[in-house]
Image (spheres, rainbow, N blue to C red):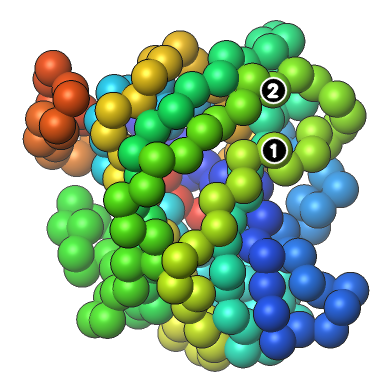
Amino acid sequence: MQTHHLAFALLLPLSALPAQLQRAVAPAGHANLDGITQNTIPFWSASATYQQVHDQSDLAVVLNNTPTTIKGLSLRKDGSTIQAASQARTMDVQITLGVTPVDSQTATATYATNLGPSPTVVLPWTNISMPAMTNISLPNPFQVVIPFATPLLYPPAAGNNLCWELRLRNNSNTAAVYIDSTAFQVGLMANFGVGCTATGGSAAAKIGIRTLQIT
């Protein structure tokens, strides 16, 4: 069991927002602030399924209470770890987004439930490249950029939490890469299930949910 709720610093390229808000960073307040921790999951695995839940209360701040078309996501290297550089890699990924009543405290081992009643595969299986990254600034720039094939309209109204799921397989390099993250609150976190062996993989992945908690 693990005891930290973690959140990636996310970059969301957006439409239907004023020009100054065309790119938004979650959690709120981290556009120019490095997170206080890091997360290596799931990119050290040859195959994995990873989910993260963002609470509506945070995204309403991030998106200025504006219904928003999310067109992609980006990640940045953590700037405060001892890792001077991460190694490049390629992998196949599928990304699904869902507007959900499940929040960061009620997410469970039932991944389909976490995604809500009408999830959307915003990126079908696609081969992507993750570049080698070094510490350039604090925080670092967003260098892992994943555009969606099908954008998702997200209305940050009460009860509309957002879950995103990233599935990966055929990861060419399982060396750790430290992604910028933030810990808000100590809580209970479990590793759920034993996964499945993806095409090109040699073993099942066991990946735990990491969720965003706003206090």
In the image, which disc is placed on residue 133? Answer: 2
Label pair 1/2, CB-CB below 8 angstroms: yes
Q: Image quarter for residue 198?
A: top left
Is residue 190 left or right of 130 when viewed as pictured?
Answer: left
Q: Amino acid at mark 2?
A: Met
Q: Looking at the picture, tell me which residue is in the foreground, 6 or 98.
A: 98
Q: Looking at the picture, tell me which residue is in the foreground, 45 or 107.
A: 45
Give how far across and how far down residue 65 sits, in percent: 69, 86
Describe the element under mark 2 as helix, strand or loop: strand
Whether residue 185 is visible here, answered yes or no, is no
Q: Amino acid at mark 1?
A: Gln
Q: Cα distance, mark 1 to mark 2?
A: 8 Å
Residue at 55% across / 58% down in the picture? 147
Give how far across and how far down residue 74 sits, in percent: 62, 49
Above-or-below relation of 196 to 85: below
- How many C-alpha atoms fall within 10 Å of the one at disc 2: few (<14), some, or many (≥20)? many
Above-or-below relation of 126 to 42: below
**In the picture, which quadrant includes the N terminus?**
top left
Residue at 52% across / 42% down in the picture? 6
Residue at 13% across / 17% down in the picture? 202
Give how far across and how far down residue 44 sits, in percent: 40, 21
**In the picture, which quadrant includes the C terminus?**
bottom right
In the image, which disc is placed on residue 19? Answer: none
Dot 1 corresponds to which residue?
143
Is residue 67 left or right of 110 when viewed as pictured?
Answer: right
Q: Image quarter for residue 170?
A: top left
